Amino acid sequence: MKKCLLNISVHVLFALVSFALVSPALAVKDTLVLAVGGESAEGYDPILGWGVYGNPLFQSTLLKRDAKLQIIPDLAESWSLSDDRITWTVTIRKDAVFSDGTPLRASDVAFTFNKALVAGGNIDLTPLDRADATGDFTVALTLKEPDITFMQHMITLGIVPEKGYTPQYGRNPIGSGPYKLVRWDEGQQMIVEANDLYYGEKPAIKRLVFLFSGEDAALAAARAGQADVLGVPSNLAGQAIPGMRLHVVKSVDNRGLMFPTVPDEGKKTPKGVRIGNTVTADPAIRKAVNYAINRELLVSGVLDGYGNPAFGVVDNLPWDNPAIRFKDNDPDKARAILDAAGWKDSDGDGVREKNGLKAEFTIVYNAKDSLRQGLALAVSDMLRPVGITAIPRGENWDRIKTELTHSNVVVYGFGDHSPLEMYKLYHTPGPEPMYWNAGFYSNPVVDGYLEQARAAESFDASLPLWQKAQWDGTTGFTTPGDAAWVWMVNLDHTYFVNTCLDVGQSQMEPHGHGWPITANIHQWKWICN
């Protein structure tokens, strides 16, 4: 049964770390202890979703991104797209082997993609028709229709061995990445060692110990000199920890308010989850909230300055549309929008009404997430002066996803290195979207742009279409258009790092504070004697 390290004494935590460091074959400087979270309850199986956000570590991918987010080869030596944009042909390197010594071949790549297509995990490979090994080192990935965003799966899907894959793979992963798993004490720690058979640049750090602890225990370990890398929320980044320096990483990790965009007409999803909210279905409410909140104050007050105001889901990425920006914190404009739409405070209680309906809704957030709670509370305070009542309410994730997500405003976090996320969030959803487009937003013009972007002849050709989906001068899913969401902040990811550790240049990180810092871990080095 999984134990929670938060319930284990700090002394026991230190004992675990000390055990992990004892190895006569390894110098202490070759071992790092990381308290950055990142434990995957489902195991480390890419086919079920491991590595979608960040770095799979144990497995290689066909392609990867460098510190500037440019696409570079990993397993692939070359890759090309057919003239009809249906088939990717990938030639893989000939020196790749799995950590058990088994050669990695194109058949393993084909198996991985075909298995992920039908596995029902967190990988959405529905654009793929099939993967075929056309030689020992060549694989053909055939799509059902043109989809330029499919490249993202070539960047994130770790390759597993066809003959070594079992239902228990995630707990004992075999891969061709820079590290291999040695021991995993679930809920406590994981020990990994450098993979001597790795084809790429050999890591200078030979052993990593990941601590899976609560915030207090992790901080205690760092203060006692028992952790070399510590991931902390921004509200803890201002402290001083002896022997460590603050490492701040920019991210596309955002926080936003998802709004139900359809009225409550008593409808439910096939699984029985209620759909709709008549207050937030009015675009005037959504626009007013966008203009009324003070994003700069959210950054300074809730994030302690470690972040930036967010105006969209893809701020500052190549597919961002700068035309969506607007003056932040403009309550007068918010009031004018509400007045024009017929929302009036007719009874003088400070809350606007329209057709007998109060301008009131609940903001639901994960009760275990203090940052999301802080954002919800702050937004609630900011909306009162314009006549909107927003009631913050903490709930557990299971209840949010199974009961509340389609009828309440929800504090969600997203952020990816692919524009495909825009499609998932804003294209007309199916009958059971879960957290992807949970508000049932739909605009046929936006759908058209998103579909054309996916079918574009090249990635560069897709960029103007992604931008038009946000705002084309007349319509779009952002604030100037339908205002389907209120994006509040983009987070900086904050870490404390041992002053003797050089972590190189970190890439802009996706959603998920913690594990993504390991994306360039093969470049890390100890710089003290």
Image (cartoon, rainbow, N blue to C red):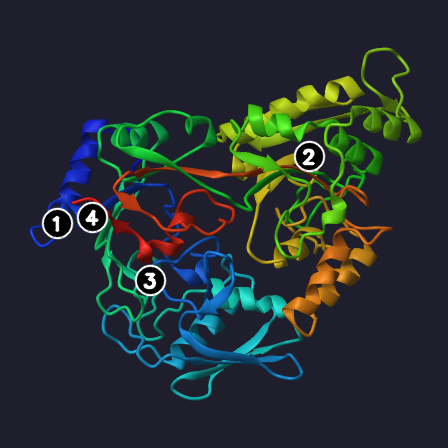
Query: Which residue is label 2 attached to?
Result: 408
N-term mark: 4 or 3: 4
N-term mark: 1 or 2: 1
Q: Position of residue 96 (x, y in %)?
A: 31, 75
Which residue is painted at 34% across and 72% down in the image?
Answer: 161
Q: Position of residue 427 (x, y in %)?
A: 72, 56
Which residue is painted at 86% across and 22% down in the image?
Answer: 353
State how far apart marks 2 and 3 are (Cα).
38 Å
Amino acid type of the residue that numbered disc 1 sits on in the rendered structure: Ala
Amino acid type of the residue that numbered disc 4 sits on in the rendered structure: Thr
State how far apart marks 2 and 4 are (Cα).
47 Å
N-term mark: 1 or 3: 1
Q: Is residue 227 left or right of residue 267?
A: left
Of the residues tagged 1 and 2, which is closer to the observer?
1
Find out whether the residues at labels 4 and 3 contact each other: C-beta distance under 8 Å.
no
Q: Position of residue 411 (x, y in %)?
A: 61, 35
Residue 197 against residue 25 in the figure, above or below: below
